[in-house]
Image (cartoon, helix red, strand yellow):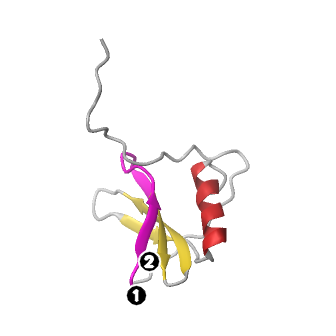
Amino acid sequence: MILWDYPPRCQGPHVASPRSHCEALRWNAPHRKGHTKAVRWTCDCETTFFELCQADDLRFIRRTKRTAGNPLVEESDRWPAAEADAMWTALLFGLVR
């Protein structure tokens, strides 16, 4: 007999563990200006989760780490959409962190 969890707990992809040749992204304090929209995200079942966000014509990756107090939110540099999408894919495969 197969038991299914419904609805499924995980609603997004999981980030692979960093690879031995993983490159470090620069993480900055969040910008508080303008409208930001999340266009992709990872599952939030882990302590740290990520969102690919768009603000104006640029995209960036937002990293949220759950801590005992307030969550720590940081953002990557901003890139044109094609470059940001490539960085998002690299993040998912453990090639950048």
- Give the vertical position of 10 relative to 2 (above or below): below
Q: Amino acid at mark 2?
A: Pro
Please name whichever residue, 72 or 36, is drawn nearer the observer in this view of the structure: 36
Q: Position of residue 36 (x, y in %)?
A: 41, 78
Residue 97 visible to an observer of this rendering: no
| Residue indicated by mark 1 | 34
Query: How crowded is the residue under tag 2: few (<14 C-alpha within 10 Å), some, or many (20+)?
Result: few
Residue 39 inside the magenta-drawn segment: yes
User: Residue 10's image quarter?
Assistant: top left
Q: What's drawn in magenta, residue-wise?
A: 34-49
Query: How crowded is the residue under tag 1: few (<14 C-alpha within 10 Å), some, or many (20+)?
Result: few
Q: Residue at x 43, y 55 (%)?
A: 49
- Which callout, 1 or 2, points to the residue nearer the camera? 1
User: Residue 16's image quarter?
Assistant: top right
| Residue indicated by mark 2 | 30
Q: Position of residue 19 (x, y in %)?
A: 67, 45
- Give the vertical position of 13 relative to 29 (above or below): above
* Residue at the extreme right: 21
Q: Residue at x 57, y 51 (%)?
A: 92
Q: Amino acid at mark 1?
A: Gly
What element does badge 1 sit on?
A: loop
